[in-house]
């Protein structure tokens, strides 16, 4: 199904996953097709700008003051079919940045910062933020960490973490455990960590799925601790701002994906 002319205001985003995107948000939003189990291709519709994401790519769109956009499969996928496994993450913007100009970033798979554990059992693809003294290519308004980790059976990933950041692990595939007390987690579950400066993930002895690995997302950032008002695709700080966003959309005041956009660089 193709949804056209979707508005957003007040947030950003990095990934796509089972949610309609015809929205106006204020913030950042990242859409990622995580390799190696993505065969399809998805594009942001021209002629206003945007791009195409394929295996392992990320599109990071900052909706800011408001944006209209479409996300559709490529003509080749529509004609031939294919497998598309994607994740969408919405990152709220601080109130001081909610009216920023819309921005679009291409973060290609070959631009990601690749990291490994000491024993080589875990591969980390760092998309945005800093991890272990290294920096990902994604440019964000809110200080965050966003990475994908692939662990061989029985492998462990132990990495330093900014104590002021929240910390979460979302399981894309497989089963394992997290934390010093080895809390079990499996596909589709989200683990939320308490305060600390270390994040630990372990893969179980037996892994199923296309990759044969324990596939997880490492997520976190500075808590904004601001009031939130939500309505459909709009995320603001007050109800008055929500009403203004709806009025702006109805009157055609939302922008489009800019033709000029950033390319992520490590």
Image: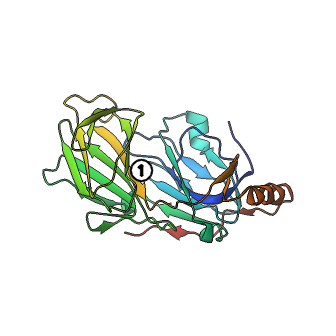
Q: How many marks?
A: 1
Give residue 103's position: percent from left, percent from top: 60, 67
Give residue 232's position: percent from left, percent from top: 70, 46
Give residue 79's position: percent from left, percent from top: 60, 36
Q: Nearer the viewer, residue 223 or 8?
A: 223
Which residue in the protein does label 1 denote?
Answer: 56
Q: Nearer the viewer, residue 222 or 153?
A: 222
**Whether residue 29 can be seen here:** no
Does 106 sit above or below residue 155?
A: below
Q: Nearer the viewer, residue 227 or 19?
A: 227
Screen quadrant of the N terminus: top right
Identity of the residue drawn at 52% across and 68% down: 141
Q: Secondary structure at mark 1?
A: loop
**Whether residue 204 can be seen here:** yes
Q: In the rendered view, does 246 fall on the left or right side of 265?
A: right
Q: Outermost residue, right direction?
A: 251
Identity of the residue drawn at 18% across and 41% down: 155
* Model colouring: rainbow
Q: In the rendered view, does 93 fall on the left or right side of 155?
A: right
Give residue 179's position: percent from left, percent from top: 25, 44
Q: In the rendered view, does 235 fall on the left or right side of 76?
A: right
Does 124 sit above or below residue 212?
A: below
Q: In the rendered view, does 58 fall on the left or right side of 199?
A: right
Splitting the image into 4 quarters, where does residue 113 fall?
A: bottom left
Screen quadrant of the C terminus: bottom left
Q: Outermost residue, left direction?
A: 119
Q: Residues within 10 Å of mark 1 (few under 14, many from 20)?
A: many
Does 261 sit above or below residue 193?
A: below
Does 4 sit above or below residue 138?
A: above
């Amino acid at each position: 199904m193709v949804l056209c002319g979707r508005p957003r205001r007040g947030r950003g985003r990095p990934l796509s996953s089972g949610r309609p995107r015809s929205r106006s948000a204020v913030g950042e939003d990242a859409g990622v097709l995580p390799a190696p189990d993505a065969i399809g291709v998805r594009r942001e519709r021209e002629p206003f700008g945007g791009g195409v994401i394929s295996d392992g790519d990320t599109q990071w769109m900052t909706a800011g003051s408001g944006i209209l956009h479409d996300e559709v499969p490529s003509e080749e996928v529509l004609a031939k079919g294919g497998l598309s496994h994607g994740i969408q993450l919405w990152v709220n913007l601080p109130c001081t940045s909610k009216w920023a100009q819309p921005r679009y970033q291409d973060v290609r798979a070959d631009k990601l910062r690749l990291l490994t554990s000491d024993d080589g059992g875990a591969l980390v693809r760092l998309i945005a933020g800093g991890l272990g003294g290294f920096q990902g290519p994604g440019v964000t308004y809110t200080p965050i960490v966003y990475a994908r980790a692939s662990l061989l059976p029985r492998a462990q990933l132990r990495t330093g973490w900014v104590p002021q950041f929240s910390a979460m692990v979302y399981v894309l595939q497989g089963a394992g455990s997290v934390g010093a007390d080895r809390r079990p987690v499996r596909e589709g579950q989200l683990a939320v960590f308490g305060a600390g400066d270390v994040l630990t993930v372990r893969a179980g002895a037996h892994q199923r799925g296309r990759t044969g690995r324990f596939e997880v997302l490492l997520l976190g950032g500075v808590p904004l601790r601001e009031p939130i008002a939500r309505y459909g695709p709009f995320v603001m700080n007050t109800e008055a701002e929500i009403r203004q966003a709806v009025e702006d959309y109805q009157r055609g005041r939302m922008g489009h994906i800019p033709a000029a956009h950033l390319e992520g660089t490590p």
